[in-house]
Image: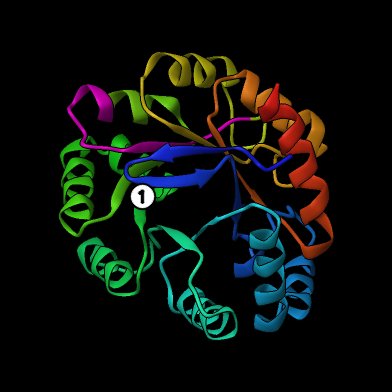
Amino acid sequence: MELPQGVIGKYKISRLICGANPFSHTAHSGELVYVGRLFAAYLTHDKIVETISLCEDNGINTLIARADNNVVEFLGKYEKKRGKRIQWIAQTAPERTPVEENIQFVADNGAIGCFIQGGQAGKLFSEGKIDDILKYVSLIKEKGMIAGVGAHDPRVITTAENAGAETDFYFLTINNVGYQCDDPKLASETMKTIDKPFIGFKVLGAGRTYPKDGFQFAVNSGADFLAVGMFDFQVLENIEIAKSIFQT
């Protein structure tokens, strides 16, 4: 049984997508101050290349990763080793401004898509700057990439959609452990109401629930795709769980 795929824009995307917070050494570990260093010690570029290779060999054909130099560097090493580039959907890096230059950066480095990072979009929403979100989405499209908006608050997505955002997809937190997802019911209603592909993220609450439970909850809630950061030793298990859920 192969890992099912869906379509976003003109691209076939595996229903399970490799997330890259671990590759950027972002652990979401609360008060545990050493975990980021542990991630950095284990996830060298060679180990990241090995992990992405394992993903692609077993049906995951897309990576979601930050729009920064670290990602471009390990993707370059991956391409050199494998002879091809895995499909990369870039997440804007809030510290890299202006946003327009960050979007140009990923377009220049071969991303198939880009979306406005959830915290960044949330800040613009809270400041009443939805027009800026629309502008960035339009620019992504102009650069030939599929375009999206990320959010922790579903209202960001609803507002952008109602304002006419030219999005190909949305990227929304969904879990039932309360981690960066304060209202899973509203998140589910949003995914089931807006007729565009939704990539669910933080579906495991950054490691606070088990894949079988987190994946099933996210899919039942309306997620079309799941973005999941993973270590090499988690890849095969995650793929088998995703196969069983998306095949039913």
Magenta span: 160-174
Q: Does the magenta stretch include residue 78?
A: no
Q: Where is residue 129 in the image (x, y as percent from the top left)?
A: 20, 40
Considering the numbered disc 1 on the image, is that residue within a helix, a strand or a loop? strand
Q: Where is residue 4 in the image (x, y as percent from the top left)?
A: 61, 38
Vertical comparison of 133 with 61: above or below: above
User: Which residue does the image show at 35% across and 54% down from the upper left?
Assistant: 114
Q: Classify the position of the C terminus by image quarter.
A: top right
Residue nearer the viewer, 15 or 184: 15
User: Which residue does the image show at 71% across and 68% down from the upper left?
Assistant: 51
Q: Where is residue 12 in the image (x, y as percent from the top left)?
A: 45, 45
Q: Position of residue 164 (x, y in %)?
A: 17, 28
Residue nearer the viewer, 186 or 168: 168
Vertical comparison of 225 with 155: above or below: below
Residue nearer the viewer, 147 or 91: 147
Q: How many labels does the image show?
A: 1
Quarter occupied by residue 157: top left
Q: Is residue 162 magenta?
A: yes
User: Which residue does the image show at 62% across and 41% down from the upper left?
Assistant: 202
User: Which residue does the image show at 84% across and 61% down from the upper left?
Assistant: 233
Q: Which colour scheme is used?
A: rainbow
Regarding residue 177, the answer to whether it shows in the image is no
Regarding residue 159, the answer to whether it shows in the image is yes
Vertical comparison of 5 with 224: above or below: below
Look at mark 1 in the image and give the residue it sits on.
115
Quarter occupied by residue 44: bottom right
Dot 1 amino acid type: Phe
Task: Give neighbour class at mark 1: few <14, some 14-19, many 20+ (Cα, 10 Å).
Answer: many
Residue 33 placement, left or right of 201? right
Residue that lies at the very extreme toward the front in this rendered image? 1
